Amino acid sequence: MNKSFSRFCIFLFAIFFSLKASALQAQSVAPSSIADSRAKSVIREHVQQMTPRQKIGALCVMNFRFWTDADQEREFYKPALAAENPKIFSPMNKINSTIYKTIKDYHIGSIILYGENMTDPLAAKKFIKDLNAAAIDGGALPLLFFADQEGGNVARVYDFASPSAMAIGKSGDTENSFLCGKANGELLLDYGINADLAPVCDISSNPQNPVIGIRSFSSDPQEAADFSEAFSRGLMSAGVLPCAKHFPGHGDTSLDSHLDLPIIYSSLSKWKKKEAVPFKANIQSGIPLIMTAHIQCPRLDKTKLKSSKSGKALVPPATLSKKILTKILRGSLGYKGAVISDAMDMRAICDNWTPEESFVLAVNAGCDLIINPINVYTKRDLDFLEDFFCKVQKALEDGDLDKKALDQAVFRTLELKEKAGLIQIQDKKISSLPQKIIPMEKSQKKKANEDLAKIQIQAARASFRNLKNPLPAKGKNILAFIPSSDKEECLQKQFLARSINDVQFVCYEERKSPKASDKEKIKAADMILVFTQLTGNAVKDKKLWQAAFPSALAREIKRQGKAKKTIAVSMNLPYDKDVFPQKDGFAWAALYNYTQIGYVRAVQALFD
């Protein structure tokens, strides 16, 4: 009887402590959600106290990529692409009175940095600090700094090189993607850049795509999802905000939105099974930022929007589509984070709408941050900037710019700054934190470079056809065909470092067939290397030199019976494998990286 009673008491105590533990656990979760709710309330109150101009400035992601002191006439608004003229504009890496005034007086909230700003590391770091100081001087919160640090041919900081997304995907291990994301994040924070406009979530579904290509992890939706999500996690582990791009998916286009307005005809059901998959995976993983694409998707949004410049009624590009950004992205996919536009000075947008029109349309559609709403590359541009602000403010007063959408965009932008560690919320106030810079030691950078090089080489060797490394090269007469002359010095150094001295280079840029002298050199060669740089446009039009010359060269090599002594090395799109048939004895490799460092890794993959 006593034993039964004892067991009963123990049972009651077990239930009591179990219930108490559950209550304590509930209490431990509740304060964080309450704190989060309070933080949101403070941010909303802060937004309500901001002036219209402060709100407009908070959404602007400005660039100071170029500068000129020339007193010249120029079009009212000039696309950035047209400004890349070394005779007029120079790369910019130091603050001046005009840039200072732009940030301070117009309450600019964010800056996007380009390669032109980053060529001198010390100057770049000072530039970033000075830009942030200008914002603080104007009474604004610290700046969000963005950069496109994808890896491969799209990188803005050059201390070490990361493989392209396609190379990472071809390595076959998502852990490599995490490591690349983490390394890129640590490098960006070394400069004070707190948000990376990566990873690319576009699926490489169209070989003719002129702008995505090797920037995509895979042509398989699930692989693209897995590798992009791992890259995002790597960035976040380093303390940098990742950004999934380009929603709703730029992979299946054959036009470049920098130059034109692409269109995709995917149905909603097909889109959900394909392009949506990587974005959905990143959303479920907590991605804080998604970038839009300037592409038309008439089967996702068939409404029309009038172009003020052409007068035509156009299907709105996704950046300006409320249905795509609000109903689909925030509704169907349940996304809660911030949305950032692709650059608004790309011709898909600026050829059809003025800067103030595209700003208003994008915010109304659901964009929270607007990249390059208007460019300030000269002192005269301050007049254009003032005109832009006046017109956007007028649109707000007239009701054309939705006040609720504007306030929500500012709210999400401030939330993003809190996530980036730029502001803190205490005592019902938002206060600035010191600029977030985490220096990388030289040894860290060296280790990161070595680790990323291994990933690049691993991907290259996984592509080998009829090829084993290391290639026996010493004492051989090597003939190397290269697509541009700037690669010769880089390759020559790599060969000499390996005591490979007898190498002849032939640059075939802009040529469609081999010369008589090329044919003689082929005849004398013991080993032939053909470096190709196939573009999406050249996949579409095989008469372009990037496709025509390698094809003609392969025929000549085969005619001379030298196919078994030839290695084709694809540096960009890996869709020229059939030009060098394995059955004929050609060897083939892919690097998925046509930068200088890509050529270095090619030599390492082949000869080490």
Image: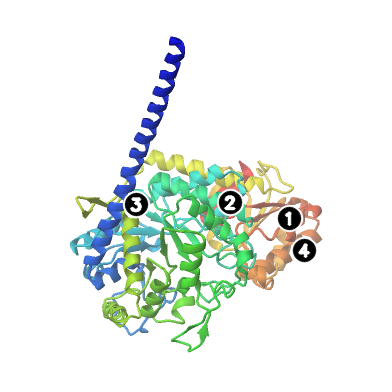
Is 348 drawn above or below residue 218 in the view shown?
below
Looking at marks 1 and 2 on the same chain, the residue that comes earlier in the sequence is marked by 2
Q: Which secondary structure lies at badge 3?
A: helix
Q: Which mark is residue 524?
A: 1
Q: Which secondary structure lies at badge 1?
A: helix
- Which residue shows up at 38% across the image and 75% down it? 359
Q: Mark 2 points at which residue?
A: 167
Q: Which secondary structure lies at badge 2?
A: helix
Q: Residue flagged by tag 1: what amino acid is it?
A: Ala
- Which residue shows up at 77% across the image and 55% down it? 562
Mark-to-mark CA distance, 4 and 2:
28 Å
Lateral position of residue 113 relative to residue 498, left or right: left
Q: Mark 3 points at which residue?
A: 419
Quick one: which residue is furthest to the front in this view? 1
| Mark in front: 4 vs 3 | 3
- Percent coordinates x, y for residue 7 in the rendering: 45, 16
Is 461 drawn above or below residue 76 in the view shown?
above
- Percent coordinates x, y for residue 443 in the rendering: 40, 38
